[in-house]
Image (cartoon, helix red, strand yellow):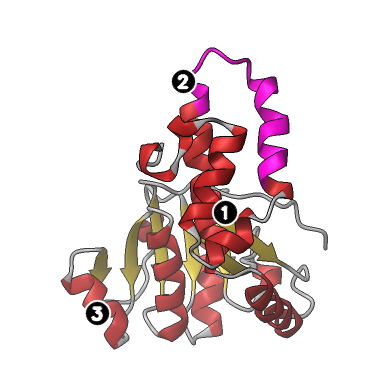
Amino acid sequence: MKYYPVYLDVKNKACLVVGGGEVGTRKVKTLLDCGARVTVVSLAVAPELFQLVRAGAVTLHRRTFRPGDLDGMFLVIGATDDPRLNLSVSREALGRNMLCNVADRPEACNFILPSIVNRGDLIIAVSTSGTSPAFAKTLRRELEQRFGPEHADFLSLMGQVRRKLLKTAHPPEAHKPLFEALIRSDLLRWIKEKDIGRINALLRKIFGKEYEIDALPGEKS
């Protein structure tokens, strides 16, 4: 099976997780991190998930799954420890042409969840097309060592510079060599070392004094 790589926008979309154990909790947290509106259906609820429910971040129905739970949902994840229940969720969802994932059962899914390295706006997804989740996790750990928190700060800075440039009268194609100069520089190392002086000197050299860190927009678009 070859999967079509894609990143889904789930912000403000209704998503259902069937199962409230450790696996279900991990799926819930990933969806929340991406801005989804998450509902959980489960008799069992892990302590960490219960804290999310108490905080109002998750809607919980503490009962067994019903087909009507799929009404209005964008996607569903089956994450119980009952294989028959997970397959029942899958059949109902696929019958409605919904996006459906069942933990550790790629044959019951129409999409799979890769191992993820998350560094702010840098998202690296690793998949073995369901053939070896263990190897995917090994590769993820290697990538986590290669790409540290400084990469998140690097991309944040690049985004701030880009937003400010887009407000100027320069044509977008004129920006490409400027960003390539940033990427070729030692900026990533200076960010890791928190060397603000060298960072600002580089920004002044390439873009001008008005692009020093304190002058850049901090909000995200």
The Cα atoms of the two marked residues, 3 and 2, are separated by: 45 Å
When the figure is inspected, residue 9 is found, relative to residue 197, above or below; the finding is: above
**Amino acid found under the numbered disc labelled 3:** Phe
**Residue sitting nearer the eye, 103 or 108:** 103
Residue at mark 2: 167
Q: Secondary structure at mark 3?
A: helix
x, y (%) of residue 7?
Answer: 60, 50
N-terminal-most mark, 3 or 1: 3
The image quadrant that residue 190 belongs to is bottom right
Q: Is residue 166 magenta?
A: yes
Instruction: Classify mark 2: residues with Cα within 10 Å, few (<14), some (14-19) or many (20+).
Output: few
The Cα atoms of the two marked residues, 2 and 1, are separated by: 47 Å
Instruction: Classify mark 3: residues with Cα within 10 Å, few (<14), some (14-19) or many (20+).
Output: some
When the figure is inspected, residue 108 is found, relative to residue 72, above or below; the finding is: below
Residue at mark 3: 50
x, y (%) of residue 23?
Answer: 47, 81
The image quadrant that residue 136 belongs to is bottom right
N-terminal-most mark, 3 or 2: 3
**Residue sitting nearer the eye, 201 or 130:** 201
The answer to whether any part of residue 110 appears in the image is yes
